[in-house]
Image: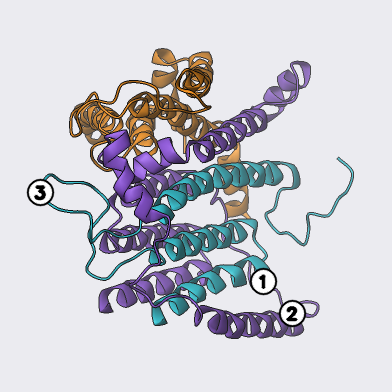
Amino acid sequence: MIEINLLLIFIIIAAIVAVEVKDLLSSVVAVGVAGFGLVISFLTLKAPDLAITQLVVEILCLIILIRATIKVDLPFSTSGRWLINTLVSIAFIAVFLSYGYKALLSLPVFGSPLMKTSDFYLSETLKSVHATNIVSAINLNFRAYDTLGEATVLFAAAIGVMSIMRRKGRLTNKNKDNESE
Amino acid sequence: MLTYFLCLVLFCVGFYAILRKRNIIKIIIGIVICEYAINLFLILFAYRMNGRSPLYSPNQGITNMVDPLPQALAMTAIVISLATTALLVGIAIRIYEKYGTFDITKINRLKG
Amino acid sequence: MNQNNGMSVIVKTVTRLLAGFILLYGIHIVLHGHISPGGGFAGGFIIALSYILFMLAFGKEEILKRVPQPMISLLESLGALMFLAIAVFGFFGGYFFANWLPKGIPFKLFSAGTIPISNVALALLEVSLGLFGIFLVLVLLKFAPLNEEKTKKK
């Protein structure tokens, strides 16, 4: 599958640009490019539900991240023990990659999944649920408990966002507004 | 095999950003790249060569579909990653309002 | 970056034409979640994006006049409660989360039991989450431009 490998190399180059560039606005744009490359690779891997969801989530993530880029990135720190820190990080990542390579050799070959439980889902969805979108039927009928847990996590995140937005109190709120204006 | 290894390399790029960067926004970008790599790995695991997408159609059978189960799990993970990114950016902006900088080596006051 | 004045005339005109179509497309994806790809999550975010487009082009005040903030909290609680009610009413079918409505013919709009109602409940939850996230980044850092001018002068 030559096109999947080419798309992955494109996403890796976009990610390296996002991490190394000094200007924060350019690195947020590079993260957006990596997300769009991911949408195209989801479409190549025959998953249209996920491509739509990833596209929309990517756009919202970009809007939220751009608001946080106020200043320029700080220069690379050359104080303290920066050389030993960088070498230890690179050594750790090299060890991680080598052990990961050995673990990946025991997976099934790319292109022939095991599908032990999915045979049940594929044959049962049309007979007993009468839905034609199998991914939705798995999410909301066979595994609806996981969707309940996800709704709880989203609710907790919304409550957290509401509590971050709130200023301190009513009296101190008036003093802060007078100072900033 | 090469495809799985490239996915692991993408995860390591994000991991390096979490370990070695000084700016909080770069650390958040590293977390986002790690999440992309994990979702991509789940979908790569479920691909069948020359398969078709898991949707019924009136004139085709069910013998050649890709695996639908990891796609359902990855959909949950994509939506949760948006929630965590929104919370992280909110906390980072609050830190900037209080300390005046994004540098993590200067945010070290314990008292409120 | 004064968000309260909105953007230029070209952006405002194009937004007035486009926002209705995006809302309609989002509602279509939510309601057809059991037939074609999409479902509650993607459709809910698309509906939120139509409101966000309006808010970015016209300023925050226009949206707050039409959809006030307590109503967004109400929508979110309603979505979560509706999803839980579908789950608890599954006891009629024998067990928690059973699919107890009659399932019709496949490929029609009113088929597959409780799945369309769950899609609508999840879409309500997503819309309010998207709107809260955007309120977060528009409310905070009101005095950021002053800091930028100070560093430029130095």
Mark 2, Cα crowd under 10 Å, few <14 / some 14-19 / many 20+, is few
On the question of residue B109 being in view, the answer is: yes
Chain where mark 1 sits:
B
Which residue in the structure is indicated by mark 1? B20
Residue A81 quadrant? bottom right
**Quadrant, the C terminus of chain B:** top right
In which quadrant of the rendered view does residue B26 lie? Answer: bottom right
The three-letter code of the residue at mark 1 reads Arg
Contact flag, marks 1 and 2 (Cβ < 8 Å) = yes
Which label sits in the foreground, 3 or 2? 3
The residue shown at (36%, 29%) is C115
Say the numbered circle drawn on residue A44.
none
- Chain in cyan colour: B
Of badges 1 and 3, the one in the foreground is 3
According to the picture, the residue beneath numbered tag 2 turns out to be A85
Q: Nearer the viewer, residue A11 or A23?
A: A11
Question: Which residue position is annotated with label 3?
Answer: B59
Quadrant of the frame with the N terminus of chain B = bottom left
Give the residue at x 35% y 55%: A119
| Amino acid, disc 2 | Asn
**Display colour for chain C:** orange
Q: Residue at (63%, 65%) from the top-left corner? A: B18
